Image: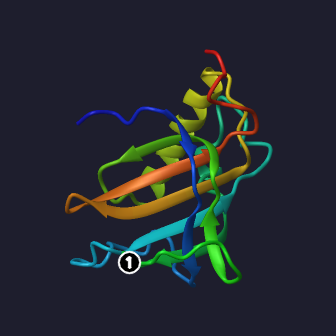
Amino acid sequence: MEEPRLIRLNLRAPLCYREEPVEPFAGPLPAGDETGELLFSFELDPEQANRIDPEPASFPGRLVAAGRRDGGQGERASAGLLQLPEGLYAFVQKRAELGREECAALAVEQQKDALWERLKLNHRLYIRLLFEDGSPVTQLFRPCLDDCMTASA
């Protein structure tokens, strides 16, 4: 299986979700619910969030918010919604539904790769779970503090 690679992503419009008390890593996504998506927002320990050798136990961090998006939902940002804001991100994905330990390991690798490329990252980590082409996908987004699209390696 191919290893996920870090992508510098310019998200041009926010992705909006209804805030719900969804528990991250609670088990498999509902089978057949291929139109639904989940988004989790985590706050990372500031001391660990910019280290090249972070403690894996500090990932994914403290859960700040959780939300659900229905396939036909075309909502824009408003009260009661969790949003993945537009902006510049260090992005990585894996074509599988990952558990807590697997997400933590992927987040650590994402951070190492981003720091190696001299990107300055925010302390926020977004984890998005969705179905794509009939299979679950786990995506990790770390907001960039600078214009990471022009950062040099």
Q: Residue at x 37, y 64 (%)?
A: 130
Looking at the picture, how far across and down is residue 81, in whole percent?
63, 78
- From what the image shows, is residue 145 above or below residue 139? above
Q: In this view, does 97 lie above or below 29?
A: above
Residue in the image at 44% along x and 52% along y: 139
Q: Amino acid under label 1?
A: Gly
**How far across and down, in percent of the image, does residue 144 sit?**
69, 39
User: Residue 125: x and y, percent?
Assistant: 62, 53
Q: How is the image coloured?
A: rainbow
The one nearer the camera, 131 or 52, is: 131
Badge 1: few (under 14), some or many (20 or more) residues near its Cα, within 10 Å?
Answer: few
Q: Residue at x 46, y 70 (%)?
A: 38
Q: Quadrant of residue 134?
A: bottom left
x%, y% of residue 52?
66, 29
* Residue in the image at 34% along x and 56% along y: 137
Taking the image as shown, residue 131 lies to the left or right of residue 24, namely left
Quarter of the image for the C terminus: give it. top right
The quarter in which the N terminus is drawn is top left
Of 131 and 27, nearer the camera is 131
Figure disc tally: 1
Residue most extreme to the top: 153
Q: What element carries label 1?
A: loop
Horizontal relation, residue 102 to residue 85: left or right: left
Q: Is residue 55 above or below residue 152?
A: below
Q: Mark 1 points at which residue?
A: 72
